[in-house]
């Protein structure tokens, strides 16, 4: 069912537009506001408060002042808040889905999927909160008893990207809350509305004032810069581009901050000659077109073994060509817009460069005329040296390159500074394990094109970052380890 303009209006009226500091939605110190646009139309949706460095420091003060009390809050109490938040997110599922579609552009069906995925981090970490164990043991020589405990890392700056407005917030906020750390959340400038609505949901779930603070703003550096120079901040978690991540790591070194970095990706999607090609096409569609390809885990390079390349290319191009382009609020839309005109120009520039270098266009290759920032789902047949294979595309464009054997597939897959996600389709389990062992990626999909899950550790290697989000590992990012040594009671009088 297509969403009406009245439904959109009523939802936007419920979204907080201020800065969340110490439990209150307040105006920015500058008195300025920030416009948020619909990428499907280019029109303004709403204006929110435009936070700056003064607001960021006020938020850090609020987080710091409640850190000790929050750290001493019983794990069960923190767990119950997260569980209530999970329930509220699902009660408000249609609100969250529509809000993401309006500000980010993805079709409603995908937005609903993100509500389910994002909500799971709240449920998962509500369960992990009360199972975050230390250990108690004697040292090997028996003279000491050691107690190893996990303590909250302290006030944390969480910087989220624009492409998954709910899931990126829940994936960072939930483990911080579970661990007992307080938070300053900096949402992406392009898609802050979902984060603000989520923050209100956390308050409604009973989160105490000051534990979660939200400072949206047009200048990310004006917010992150002074915070990372302040000794009260103890942790920064960032999801975004590798160049920005490098700058944040340099800044973090000044105060020796704990860091989690989930950065760029250039995922290979490998199709071996024994693969079920229909399943491989379906998997490639999921890995490529989820979020219009605007995902760090998106299949960025399709590597297909020579003997099955013609058949796979034909089926994959047909599937991409059949996708319906449209505003995400339309019931039949499969592919929404690129986030803004600059991003669309970047995508088109990569396609044009690849064509100039000899790529064959199997389908697509053009910007869609009219309002909004739409781009045709595109498939290119390219050579191994095509420049597009070294770039993170962040759009609905799939370059395909052929390989001869397993060794070449591994070499091509590893020919990138990034190491986040990879996918492979083969019916040979031994090959799957052998290839997974040799490719340099933190996430590997075996006969599966969508593998992210709240219960699994998410993160990469090389220039794709450090640390893990989700899984049993996720809560560790927001704790510090303390060892207490004491004389063994059996070795002293």
Image (tube, helix red, strand yellow):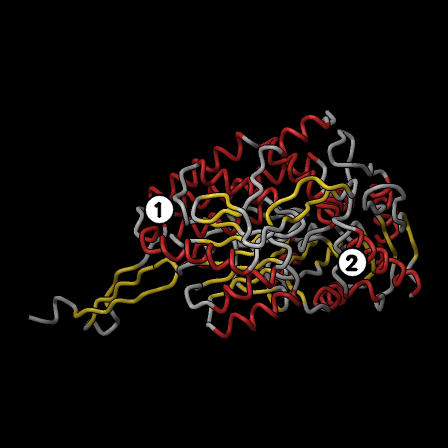
For the point 46% across and 72% down, which residue is it? 256
Residue 485 vs residue 408, the one in the foreground: 485
Residue 451 vs residue 447, the one in the foreground: 451
Q: Position of residue 19 (x, y in %)?
A: 53, 47
Quadrant of res 334: top right
* Residue bearing the label numbered 1: 130
Location of the C terminus (image quadrant): bottom left
407 relative position to 382: left or right? left
* Residue bearing the label numbered 2: 303
Residue 464, compared with residue 163, is above or below; it is below
Residue 45 vs residue 250, the one in the foreground: 45
Location of the N terminus (image quadrant): top right
Q: Position of residue 45 (x, y in %)?
A: 70, 39
For the point 46% across and 62% down, which residue is it? 235
Whether residue 291 is visible, yes or no, is yes
Residue 5, compared with residue 69, is above or below; it is above
State the separation of the CA atoms marked 2 and 1.
44 Å
Quadrant of res 433: bottom right
Q: Position of residue 460 (x, y in %)?
A: 59, 62
For the point 78% across and 30% down, which residue is it? 332
Which label lies toward us, 2 or 1? Answer: 1
Q: Position of residue 47 (x, y in %)?
A: 65, 43
Whether residue 446 is visible, yes or no, is no
Residue 263 vs residue 182, the one in the foreground: 182
Q: Give the SS element for disc 2.
A: strand
Q: Give the SS element for disc 1.
A: helix
Mark 1 surroundings within 10 Å by alpha-carbon count, few (fewer than 14), some (14 through 19), many (20 or more)? some
Q: Which mark identifies residue 209?
A: none
Mark 2 surroundings within 10 Å by alpha-carbon count, few (fewer than 14), some (14 through 19), many (20 or more)? many
- Ranked by sequence position, the earlier of labels 2 and 1 is 1
């Amino acid at each position: 069912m297509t969403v009406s303009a009245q439904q959109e209006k009523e939802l936007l009226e419920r979204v907080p537009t201020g800065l969340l500091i110490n439990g209150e939605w307040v105006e920015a110190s500058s008195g300025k506001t920030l416009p948020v646009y619909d990428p499907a139309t280019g029109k303004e949706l709403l204006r929110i408060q435009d936070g700056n460095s003064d607001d960021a420091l006020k938020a850090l003060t609020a987080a710091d002042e409640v850190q000790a009390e929050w750290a001493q809050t019983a794990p069960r109490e923190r767990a119950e808040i997260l569980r209530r938040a999970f329930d509220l997110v699902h009660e408000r599922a249609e609100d969250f889905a529509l809000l993401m579609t309006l500000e980010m552009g993805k079709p409603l069906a995908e937005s609903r999927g993100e509500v389910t995925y994002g909500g799971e981090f709240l449920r998962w970490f509500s369960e992990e909160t009360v199972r975050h164990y230390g250990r108690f043991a004697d040292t090997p020589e028996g003279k000491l008893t050691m107690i190893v405990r996990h303590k909250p890392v302290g006030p944390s700056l969480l910087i989220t990207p624009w492409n998954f407005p709910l899931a990126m917030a829940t994936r960072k906020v939930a483990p911080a809350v579970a661990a007992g750390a307080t938070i300053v959340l900096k949402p992406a400038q392009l898609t802050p509305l979902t984060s603000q609505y989520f923050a209100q949901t956390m308050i409604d779930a009973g989160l105490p004032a000051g534990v979660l603070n939200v400072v949206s703003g047009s200048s990310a550096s004006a917010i992150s810069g002074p915070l990372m120079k302040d000794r009260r901040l103890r942790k920064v978690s960032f999801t975004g581009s590798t160049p920005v991540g490098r700058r944040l790591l340099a800044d973090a070194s000044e105060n020796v901050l704990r860091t989690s970095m989930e950065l760029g990706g250039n995922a290979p999607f490998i199709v071996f000659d024994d693969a079920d090609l229909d399943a491989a096409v379906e998997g490639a569609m999921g890995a490529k077109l989820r979020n219009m390809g605007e995902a760090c885990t998106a299949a960025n390079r399709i590597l297909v073994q020579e003997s099955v390349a013609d058949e796979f290319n034909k089926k994959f191009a047909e599937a991409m060509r059949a996708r319906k382009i449209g505003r995400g609020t339309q019931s039949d839309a499969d592919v929404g817009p690129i986030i803004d005109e600059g991003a669309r120009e970047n995508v088109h520039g990569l396609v044009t460069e690849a064509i100039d270098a000899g790529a064959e266009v199997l389908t697509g290759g053009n910007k869609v005329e009219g309002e909004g920032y739409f781009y045709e789902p595109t498939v290119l047949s390219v050579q191994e040296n095509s420049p597009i294979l070294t770039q993170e595309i962040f759009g609905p464009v799939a370059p395909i390159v052929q390989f001869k054997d397993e060794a070449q597939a591994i070499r091509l897959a590893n020919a990138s500074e990034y190491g986040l996600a990879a996918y492979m389709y083969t019916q040979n389990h031994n090959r799957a394990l052998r290839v997974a062992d040799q490719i340099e990626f933190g996430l590997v999909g075996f006969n599966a094109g969508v593998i992210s899950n709240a219960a699994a550790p998410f993160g990469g290697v090389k220039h794709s970052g450090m640390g893990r989000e989700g899984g049993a590992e996720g809560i560790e990012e927001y704790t510090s380890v303390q060892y207490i040594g004491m004389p063994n009671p059996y070795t002293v009088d």
